[in-house]
Amino acid sequence: QVQLVESGGGLVQPGGSLRLSCAASGRTFSSYVMAWFRQPPGKAREFVGASSTGGTTFYSDSVKGRFTISRDNAKNTVYLQMNRLKPEDTARYYCAATTRAGIYTSVTAYDYWGQGTQVTVSS
């Protein structure tokens, strides 16, 4: 079992930056594939990016080149650095974890979820 707690959301102007954090409980954080998803208002939850246990990252086309995922296994934390934010990035952002090997873009592949943190991009 692992518990995930996101933080760092807020209101930011277009073109701005935010860094989200996801703190995980437990002593086996390094064995989890960690991912970020987001859910815009009135829409389905969508894949943003993920980090393998070895730190390899993969991103959706919509955020590639603007968002960066990193993980600090010593702190049991994964980060999502978001740069050049756009109004269409407005969503509730969720951290997710799985012990399955590989990187998955499907919601159903992840076993553990945080409560999410709201990101609003608006002038």
Image (tube, rainbow, N blue to C red):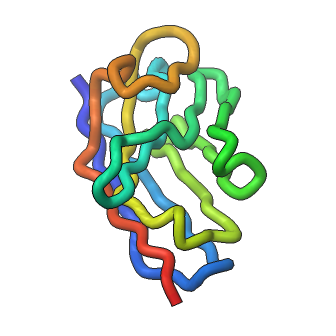
> Please, is residue 58 above or below residue 13 in the view?
above
Which of 71/109 is in front?
A: 109
> Please, is residue 85 above or below residue 22 in the view?
below
Which of 56/43 is in front?
A: 43
- Quadrant of the drawing holding the N terminus: top left
Residue at the (67%, 78%) spot, across then down: 15
> Please, is residue 91 above or below residue 109 in the view?
below
- Left or right position of 17 against 22: right
Which of 68/24 is in front?
A: 68
Report the residue that reaches farthest toward the front. Answer: 42
Residue at the (59%, 24%) spot, across then down: 52
Residue at the (54%, 72%) spot, across then down: 87
Regarding residue 23, the answer to whether it shows in the image is no
Which of 97/73 is in front?
A: 97
Regarding residue 118, the answer to whether it shows in the image is yes
Report the residue that reaches farthest toward the top. Answer: 101
- Left or right position of 122 against 16: left
List x then y, in percent, for residue 45.
36, 41
